[in-house]
Image (cartoon, rainbow, N blue to C red):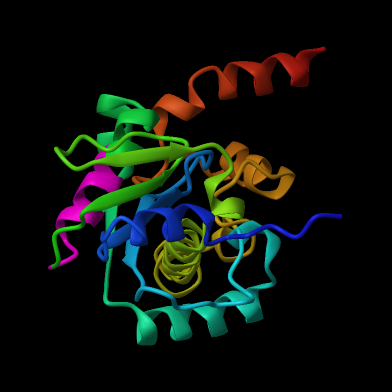
Amino acid sequence: MTEINRLEFEASLWSQGLTAVAGVDEVGRGCLFGDVVAAAVILPVGLVLEEVNDSKQLSEKKRDRLYDLIIEEAVAWSVARIEASVIDTIDIRQASRLAMKQAVQGLGVVPQHLLVDAETVDLEIEQSAIIKGDSLSQSIAAASIVAKVTRDRLCTEVWETLYPGYGIAVHKGYATKVHREALQELGPTALHRRSFLKGFFDVQEQLLFE
């Protein structure tokens, strides 16, 4: 199996004299509940973080450790959140893109190039949309870890307390059986994405009477 060079994209840009290369990614796009969270990370030229990979491929313990390392090593990093009511208003793709835009704007350093996971950011900055970028680029992978850890901590430390009984700390807002059953029993909260639940209760009722 060929080993992935996760600095291929960065190295090409660095060789052109671009030192402020930002990786950008989001998490929570497919959830029924809560904010979509995006992160932007600029890492130092030449830095190699061997274990950094797509956040979904890492254990929670490793993500937490790498989160601390990324925050410590980054030239700049930023996180942005777009809440459920906005997602319902502008749709999840536009909300994800808005979160990415806000994350980049919050960096405090103006990036010379953006490496984005399969998306475009609505900013006048040169950028590359990379399919499966969180597996292929160290910078995007770093952003995915920062975004994932941020959102998971919101689930476990904030939203679980605000809305007990839904299992948010466990399923992180995704449409698991436990989550669907809790929705059926308790109804949606203020942080549920109503646009994602359209037809959900109709389907549940139909199943009950079949």
The dominant secondary structure in magenta is helix
User: Where residue 128 sits: x, y (%)?
Assistant: 38, 39
Q: Which residues are magenta?
A: 98-108
Above or below residue 31? Residue 197 is above
- Say which of 89 and 209 sits in front: 89
The residue lying furthest to the right in this view is 1
Task: Using the rendered view, name the quadrant where residue 58 is placed.
Answer: bottom right
Task: Using the rendered view, name the quadrant where residue 94 is placed.
Answer: top left
User: Where residue 150 sits: x, y (%)?
Assistant: 41, 68
Q: Residue at x 16, y 61 (%)?
A: 106
Q: Residue at x 52, y 62 (%)?
A: 7
Q: Residue at x 56, y 85 (%)?
A: 65
Above or below residue 1? Residue 198 is above
Above or below residue 52? Residue 16 is above
Q: Quadrant of the N terminus?
A: bottom right
Q: Is residue 73 visible?
A: yes
Q: Is residue 85 visible?
A: no
Q: Quadrant of the C terminus?
A: top right
User: Where residue 52 sits: x, y (%)?
Assistant: 58, 70
Task: Using the rendered view, name the quadrant where residue 184 is placed.
Answer: top right
Q: Is residue 101 magenta?
A: yes
User: Where residue 2 sits: x, y (%)?
Assistant: 80, 55
Above or below residue 54? Residue 157 is below
Q: Is residue 99 magenta?
A: yes
Q: Is residue 98 left or right of residue 140?
A: left
- Say which of 210 and 41 sits in front: 41
Q: Residue at x 53, y 80 (%)?
A: 66
- Say which of 162 and 175 sits in front: 175
Q: How many marks?
A: 0
Q: Is residue 43 left or right of residue 126?
A: right
